[in-house]
Image (cartoon, grey):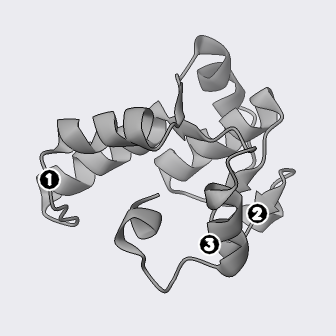
Amino acid sequence: MLWWLRADERLSERASAVIANGDNELLWSVASSWEVGVKLGLGKLRIDRPVHRLFAHLLGDQGLRSLPITHEHCARLSSLPHHHRDPFDRMLVVQAQTESVPILSADPKLSRYDIEILW
């Protein structure tokens, strides 16, 4: 979503089309907000507005629905194969599996999981 907001060339045409299609329900995981907060604090990410405004923009103006992290999601992490070490991406995989939704990601490591990836 950050690439979408910045019109970043790294965002694939398919991902752009999925995001732009108003018929699609787009979810924003709390895991993504958590990752943004961590990366901002470490200086690994810069954004053009205060982080609380970014989240308000995504969940308001962009129309994304918040996807909370549940106890079920956390429990499923224990049985998720270790194809990927990134804790945020692992949570997104578990959420995609649990909620039966595809995931938008350019990360090729995620293709080793039993999820649908739109890219």
Q: Position of residue 51 (x, y in %)?
A: 19, 43
SS at badge 1: loop
Q: Give the Cα distance between marks 2 and 1.
A: 28 Å
Q: Residue 6 has which mark? A: none
Residue that appears at 71% across and 27% down: 76
Could you give the CA–CA distance between mark 3 and mark 2, rounded to whole angstroms? 9 Å
- The residue identified by callout 1 is 49
Whole-percent x, y for residue 19 in the image: 62, 57
Q: Are marks 3 and 2 in contact (CB under 8 Å)?
A: no
- The answer to which of 29 and 22 lies nearer the viewer is 22
In the picture as drawn, the residue positioned furthest to the bottom comes out as 9
Residue extending farthest top: 71
Does the rendering let one see residue 7?
A: yes
Which residue corresponds to the image point at 69% horizontal and 67% vertical from the top-left? Answer: 17
- Lateral position of residue 34 relative to residue 72, left or right: left
Judge the density around disc 3: few (<14), some (14-19), many (≥20) Cα neighbours within 10 Å: some
Question: Is 114 situated above or below 74?
Answer: below
Query: Is 40 drawn above or below residue 37 in the view shown?
Result: below
Name the residue carrying label 2: 118
How busy is the neighbourhood of tag 2: few (under 14 within 10 Å), some, or many (20 plus)? few
Quadrant housing the C terminus: bottom right
Between marks 1 and 3, how big is the CA–CA gap? 24 Å
Q: Which of pointers 2 and 1 indicates the residue nearer the eye?
A: 1
Residue at 21 percent across and 66 percent down: it is 44
Amino acid identity at mark 1:
Arg
> 28 and 21: which one is in front?
21
The amino acid pointed to by label 2 is: Leu
Q: Earlier in the sequence, mark 2 or mark 1?
A: 1
Whether residue 82 is visible = no
| Left/right of residue 28 with respect to residue 94 in the rendered view | left
Decide which of 6, 101 is in the foreground and name it: 6
Residue 73 pos. (x, y %) = 64, 24
